[in-house]
Amino acid sequence: MRKVDRFILLLLAVTPLLIVANIALAQNYSASLVENSEGIGISNSIASLLIREDGWSVESFKQAYHLSAILVILTSLLNLVLIIYRLITSNTRKATLG
C-alpha cells in the first residue's frame, strides 16, 4: 500500500470525528448565546473535552467552533484532492502498463 493510500485512509477515518466535534462545538456555542441567569457553561461532554475550563466566554466558544469548522473544511478538501490525485495516478499507471 502506498503512503498516499495510507494517508487517505487516515484522513477518511479522522474526518467523521472532526465533524462530530464541530457539531458539539456549534451546539455549545449556540447554547451560550441564550440568556441564562446562571451564566454560560459547557453544554455537552464532547465540548468539555475540547474547551479548557479557564476563560469561558461566548467569544472563546465562537472561536473554538470557527477553528473547528475551518479544520473540517480543510480536511474534507484535502481528502477530495488526494482521492482525485490517487485516481489520476492509478489511471495513468494502468495506461502506461497496459
Image (tube, rainbow, N blue to C red):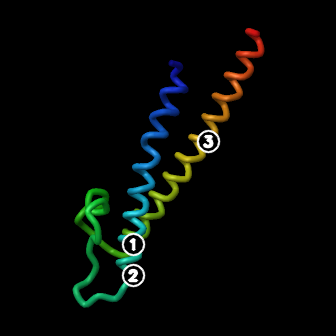
Report helix, strand or loop for mark 2.
loop
Amino acid type for the residue under numbered disc 2: Leu
- Kindly indicate the quadrant of the structure image that contains residue 4: top right
Residue positioned 77% across, 16% down in the render: 95
**Which residue is found at the position 67% from the left and 29% from the top?**
87
The residue type indicated by label 1 comes to Tyr
Mark 3 vs mark 2: in front: 3
User: Are there few (<14), some (14-19), or many (20+) residues within 10 Å of tag 3?
Assistant: some
Please indicate whether residue 44 sits to the left or right of residue 65 in the image. left
Q: Are marks 3 and 1 in contact (CB under 8 Å)?
A: no
Front-most of residues 98 and 56: 98
* Among the two numbered marks 3 and 2 on one chain, the one whose residue lies closer to the N terminus: 2
Q: State how far apart marks 3 and 1 are (Cα).
A: 28 Å
Q: Judge by depth and name the residue closer to the eye, 64 or 54.
A: 64
In the image as oriented, which residue stretches furthest toward the top?
97
**Residue at horizontal 28%, vertical 67%?**
44
Tell me how many marks there are.
Answer: 3
Residue labelled with disc 1 = 29
- Which of 25/98 is in front? 98
Query: Mark 2 sits on what residue?
Result: 33
Tag nearer the camera, 3 or 1: 3
Residue 34, percent across and down?
A: 37, 85
Residue 11 sits above or below residue 70 on the image: above
Q: Residues within 10 Å of mark 1 (few under 14, many from 20)?
A: many
Q: Quadrant of residue 92?
A: top right
Question: Which three-letter amino acid code belongs to the residue tagged 3?
Answer: Leu
